[in-house]
Amino acid sequence: MKPILEVLSGRALAVPPVWFMRQAGRYLPEYRALRERAGSFLDLCFTPELAAEVTLQPIRRFGFDAAILFSDILVVPHALGRSVSFEAGEGPRLDPLDDAAKLNALAATADEKVFAPVYEAVRRVKRELSANLALLGFCGAPWTVATYMIAGRGTPDQAPARLMAYREPRAFGRMIEILVTVSSRYLVEQLRAGADAVQIFDTWAGVLPPAEFARWCIEPMRKIVANVRAEIPDARIIGFPRGAGASLDTYVNHVPVNALSIDWTAEPGFIRDKVQRKAAVQGNLDPLVLLAGGSALDRGIDEILENFSRGPFIFNLGHGILPETPIAHVEQTLRRIRSR
Ligand code: CP3
């Protein structure tokens, strides 16, 4: 069995499998070259041969244990008819949904044609990937996708979406339900096209008070997992509620994911006791430690292996790799993990 799938089935491996969030991206010169030729970022996502090529770039260079499909969480709002663009150096721009009337007018179904090239990219990667490597699909969690749809951009604390959820809970709830339905279908089709597992990114889970976290993160996630498993009973799912902290306990008790991806602020003893007994753990090197390199990196890697590798564990970062990260530091990390 592929090492990552063994871990997702609950086994501990002596040498943990490893991949990095955002492993295909701007820190790679071959990515920057292809990105320049592709035109817009969305053209890159929606051209299957290019998306497949970018997906495979970090695999060829480093030999990670998993490839993650090259795409973005914001293809879902795009399929819901929202305008989405990525300006160089500025991040995503969407047409903001900044009042209840706009939320209530949001289309309830996605244009499935938009997703077709994504599934085709999955099939292409699957054909080229060697048998021991896993292919991961993904989507954004409803809460995190909603934060970008409401603000129309990234913000430091996603205040616009939090305000909307407090002021207009019905309209906001309708939007979350739409995202649950569309995301569930999207993940099922990625799995049918050949993804071995899927990760659901809830990058902004950490900005909510516990009751709102339960309502807008846990509950929609629980529904997505149930919807996907209703169609694919053994679907393997990784959850990433970034910044959830002590609420990870509640999360793992209510959302039956195979693995929880944790950020670098998580307390190791708490994670072993409350999380790793119930699900595999993935994480959690600080991307800035990877950027720093040297003995800080060696120490960071060793601590993580000591903390988590006695249970089911996938080595990863605590969030996406930073564009300034030196290639040599990624090589150093893989060597160190695999030489134990
Ligand atoms: O992990 C991978 O290698 C697969 C590809 C992937 C991308 N985005 C490519 C991308 C994945 C899994 C994502 C997820 C994503 N996208 C998240 C969740 C994870 C996280 O990082 O928090 C979020 C919040 C987004 C939304 C998004 N897309 C933002 C905020 C930005 C701008 C910031 C940035 O890093 O540039 C993007 C753009 C984006 N998505 C790029 C890449 C490679 C850079 C675009 C470029 O090449 O110019």
Image (cartoon, rainbow, N blue to C red):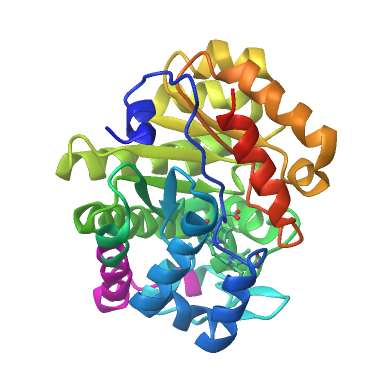
Is 24 situated left or right of 256 in this image? right
Camera-side residue of 95 and 118: 118
Image-based side of 63 in relation to 147, left or right: left
| Residue in the image at 36% along x and 45% along y | 133
On the image, the x and y values in percent for residue 251 come to 49, 28
- Quarter of the view holding residue 127: bottom left
Looking at the rendered image, the quarter that the N terminus falls into is top left
Q: Image quadrant of ligand 1?
A: bottom right
In this rendering, the answer to whether 38 lies above or below 120 is: below
Q: Position of residue 58 (x, y in %)?
A: 52, 58
Residue drawn at the location 83% of the way across and 34% of the way down: 296
Residue range of the region highlighted in magenta in the rendering: 102-123
The residue drawn where x is 39% and y is 35% is: 4
The dominant secondary structure in magenta is: helix
Decide: is 247 above or below 30: above
Image location of residue 57, percent across then percent down: 49, 64
Report the front residue among 128 and 292.
Answer: 128
